[in-house]
Amino acid sequence: MGVLAVACVVALVMSLTGRSGRQRLQSAATLICTNPQCLQKTEMTLAEIRTVKRARPAHDSDPPIFECPKCKQMTAYGAVICPSCHLAFLPFKARRTASGQWECPGCHAEVKTTAR
């Protein structure tokens, strides 16, 4: 369970590596709502994600879950963005390749599970 939480947090910040601390906090991570009536894709900055996690430590989950800004349900999760086709997908719903990486459900490219 802890490995999945780490992987999801890494997924949230994968695109944020290589920038200064301030730029990283202002960069956006994509969240996807899993509520079937909503399915909203939204962006939050890393600073906003930290604020939410600090305000609701009792709601820590594995993988981390957030309130969807559209439907107001606790059904939003951090997404991974495929570097090949730019599809946003939820890592815990994706298949794993033989090498242990995520497989993009759109183009079937391998998506690294660790930040560079």
Image (cartoon, rainbow, N blue to C red):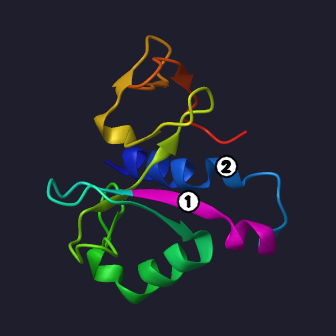
Q: Is residue 107 magenta?
A: no
Q: Is residue 96 above or below residue 46?
A: above
Q: Is residue 27 magenta?
A: yes
Tag 2: amino acid: Ser
How far separated are the C-alphas under marks 2 and 1? Answer: 8 Å
User: What span is in magenta?
Assistant: 22-31
Tag 1: amino acid: Ala
Residue located at (48% from left, 51% from top): 6
Q: Nearer the viewer, residue 108 or 21?
A: 108
Q: Position of residue 24 (x, y in %)?
A: 73, 66
Q: Is residue 101 above or below residue 83?
A: above
Residue located at (79% from left, 69% from top): 23
Q: Nearer the viewer, residue 28 or 11?
A: 28
Badge 2 density bin: few <14, some 14–19, many ≥20, Cα 10 Å: some
Q: Is residue 6 above or below residue 114?
A: below
Identify the mark nearer the N-term, 2 or 1. Answer: 2
Q: Which residue is mark 2?
A: 15
Q: Which residue is mark 1?
A: 29
Q: Position of residue 9 (x, y in %)?
A: 50, 55
Check disc 2 and report its element: helix, strand or loop.
helix
Q: Position of residue 22 (x, y in %)?
A: 79, 75
Q: Residue furthest left?
A: 37
Q: Quadrant of the C terminus?
A: top right
Residue located at (42% from left, 25% from top): 106
Q: Is residue 95 above or below residue 14?
A: above
Q: Are marks 2 and 1 in contact (CB under 8 Å)?
A: yes
Describe residue 20's horizontal placement relative to residue 37 as left or right.
Answer: right
Residue located at (28% from left, 81% from top): 58
Badge 1 density bin: few <14, some 14–19, many ≥20, Cα 10 Å: many
Which quadrant of the structure image shows residue 60? bottom left
